[in-house]
Amino acid sequence: MSRQYEEVRMPLTEGATLLHPERALLRLEGINSRSDIGQICYLRRDTSSSHRRDELSIS
């Protein structure tokens, strides 16, 4: 499965806005690797049962 992404060069210019941060691949000046913000957010999400939507309560 593929997903859309946008390579964003850092540092951002003053006043710049990321419309879809979940698609951002950050390219830091002077570093060859990129950071996938969507992947970082997914890995750090709260998966405790109290924060998940209870599918059975939806009618």
Image: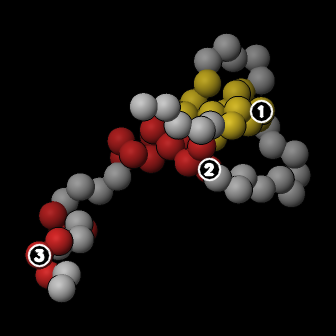
Q: Quadrant of residue 43?
A: top left
* Residue at the extreme right: 14
51 or 59: nearer the viewer:
59
Residue 38 place in picture, x, y as percent? 50, 43
Residue 54 relative to residue 34: left or right: left
Position of 59 compared to 39: left or right?
left
Q: Quadrant of the N terminus?
A: top left
Q: CA distance from mark 2 to mark 1?
A: 13 Å
Q: In the orientation shown, which residue stands out farthest toward the bottom?
A: 59
Residue 30 falls in image quadrant: top right
Whether tag 2 and tag 3 are in contact, CB under 8 A, the answer is: no
Q: Residue at x 61, y 18 (%)?
A: 33
User: According to the image, label 2 marks what residue?
Assistant: 21
User: Which residue bears the numbered disc 3?
Assistant: 56
Label ID, residue 9: 1
Label 1 neighbourhood size at 10 Å, few (<14), some (14-19), many (20+)?
A: some
Of mark 2 and mark 1, the one earlier in the sequence is 1
The label on residue 33 is none
**Residue depicted at x 17% and y 71%:** 55
Relative vertical location of residue 8 with respect to residue 19 in this rendering, above or below: above
User: Left of 3 or right of it: where is 21?
Assistant: right
Q: CA distance from mark 1 to mark 3?
A: 44 Å
Q: Where is residue 36 shown, x and y percent of the image? A: 54, 34
Comes first in the chain, label 2 or label 3: 2
From the image, state whether disc 2 or disc 3 is nearer to you.
3
The residue sitting at 19% across, 59% down in the picture is 48
- Kind of residue sitting beneath label 3: Leu
> Label 1 is placed on what type of residue?
Arg
Percent from the top left, x then y, of residue 4? 59, 38
